[in-house]
Image: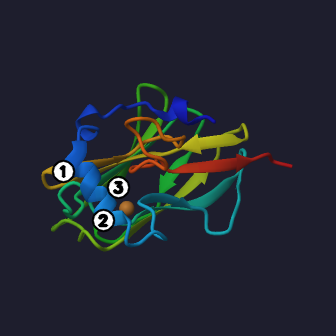
Amino acid sequence: MDYGQDMTRPSATTLGAGITGLAAAVLLCVPAPAQAHGIIDLGSVDAVAGRTSTMTLEVQHGCITNATGTLQVEASVGRPWRRVAPQPVRGWTVGVQRLPSGGQQITWTKQGDPHPFGTPVFFPIRVTWPQKPGVYSMKVVQACPGDVTTWGTPPGPATANSPSPPITPIPQVKVLPAN
Ligand SMILES: [Cu+2]
């Protein structure tokens, strides 16, 4: 599991949602169990080491503490990810920035009003996958008026203070060997 190396930008501000945030998240997400939150969809095409294909980052609803619409979405990946080229999405501007760690961050910014809470948004990205097969993560930070949600919790069994699966799971992708 390689998600550790992707955790380049801890967002302390986003982890403090607390009990209220967790309760709200459960209420919002339980009625639609088929829906995830921030997800990677490969569109029936495997991610293969060193090759290029298109994935979609789907953000299925707005921020979970205040149930507000989305202003900005940041997706960050670690150094092993090679080229990431976000495709244009109507109503959003986008840019890619190299991080000091060697990773990359894509930032989508909504033009005009926030993207409505209950409407999913789809961000296609052309990706050249890491050279080494493995499991890789894309941490997603979603900013809304007065609220931030970070999809950044690695999967794992429940412990005293963390449920399983996590309330805000980190999207991951399995990169397969090239042969
Ligand atoms: Cu959800």
Residue 147's disc is 1
Which residue is depicted at the point 43% across and 30% down?
8
Which residue is depicted at the point 41% across and 35% down?
160
Mark 2 to mark 1 CA distance (whole Å): 15 Å
Q: Amino acid at mark 3?
A: Val
Q: Is residue 153 above or below residue 119?
A: above
Residue 17 visible in the picture: no
Q: Position of residue 110 (x, y in %)?
A: 25, 62
Q: Quadrant of residue 12?
A: top left
Mark 3 to mark 2 CA distance (whole Å): 28 Å
Q: Position of residue 155 (x, y in %)?
A: 53, 43
Sequence-first disc among 2 and 1: 2
Q: Amino acid at mark 2?
A: Leu
Q: Return the residue at label 3.
A: 94
Sequence-first disc among 3 and 2: 2
Q: Return the residue at label 2.
A: 28
Q: Which of label 1 and label 3 is nearer to you?
A: 1
Which residue is depicted at the point 25% across and 68% down?
117
Mark 1 to mark 3 CA distance (whole Å): 21 Å
Q: Amino acid at mark 1?
A: Asp
Query: Does the residue at mark 3 contact the one at mark 2 (Cβ under 8 Å)?
Result: no
